[in-house]
Amino acid sequence: MPGVDLRYRLLYKPAVFAASLVPLAWLVCCLFGWLGFSAGVDPVKFLELECGQTALNFIFITLMVTPARQLAGLPHLLRLRRMLGLFAFFYAALHFTVYLALDLEFDWRTLGADIAKRPYITVGFTALLMLIPLAVTSTNRMMRRLGRRWTKLHRLVYVIAAFGVWHYYWQEKKDVREPLLYAAALVLLLGYRAVRVRCPGRLTPRAHITS
Ligand code: HEM
């Protein structure tokens, strides 16, 4: 379809890029008390939690691209997926950096002990490690080079999402309703994918949409 390429390049991609930076801008405003925002009494904890939450949100938004494009008949939405996935990695890395630099003050020994002894940290760290190969292989060149193996490798995102939710659930001391909501959303996304694989035409509203 002529014009779609141009629209994505000049309009949609820059808009999604700018929107993806809004959480970061908001965090900066909270930290410096700009525009009436505040990071509360414990800014380090605030930053840590907000970055973790944002990383998880981006993982889920990335996972929603495929169902959204298939159900809404917008195949070109796929062009936004890589950017969203990379933002998930960016916020997860920021979450880890805040923890390491501001919470632990680069105390590597405590980091090692936390990873080894605190199960929710072990799970979060594993999720972050799994995100690295996905970020590294997100280029067109790597996609071409890996061929079918690229698709297989990138299915890891479902495991990462599950680990992210598990990590969230485990670190939550009082109210686990929100992590459970994420878990339910993940079950829905996986269920959708399972139905698509088993009965390909079933969830396709328009005949021209490819899986
Ligand atoms: C894909 C990777 C990760 C995701 C998606 C993620 C997500 C989250 C989420 C959603 C929260 C709770 C936020 C809230 O309550 O609003 C959280 C908390 C936390 N995460 Fe992660 N995380 C990840 C990796 C890591 C790693 C690598 C570490 C450290 C090694 C880590 C350490 C923590 C800590 C210390 C907390 C706060 C716990 C507390 O104070 O109660 N996370 N994370």
Image (spheres, rainbow, N blue to C red):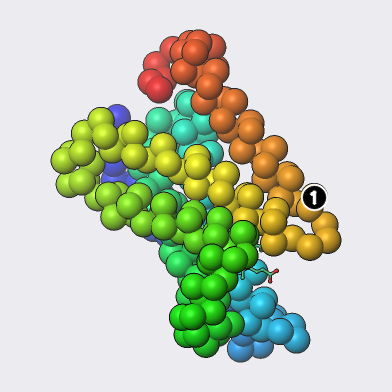
Q: Is residue 138 visible?
A: yes
The residue shown at (55%, 56%) is 123
**Residue 129 picture quarter:** bottom left
Judge left or right: residue 210 versus residue 116.
left
User: Mark 1 = which residue?
Assistant: 177
Could you tell me residue 183's position as x and y percent? Answer: 67, 42
Q: Residues within 10 Å of mark 1 (few under 14, many from 20)?
A: few
Quarter placement of the N terminus: top left
Q: Which SS class for mark 1?
A: helix
What x and y, as percent, mark residue 63? 50, 40
Residue 90 on image: x %, y %: 43, 64
Q: Quadrant of residue 153?
A: top left
Quadrant holding the C terminus: top left
Question: Is 5 in front, or is 53?
Answer: 53
Residue at 69% across / 61% down in the picture?
171
Task: Say if 72 sits above or below 172 in the image.
Answer: above
- Three-letter code for the amino acid on which mark 1 is drawn: Arg
Picture residue at 50% right of the left edge, 42% below the top: 159
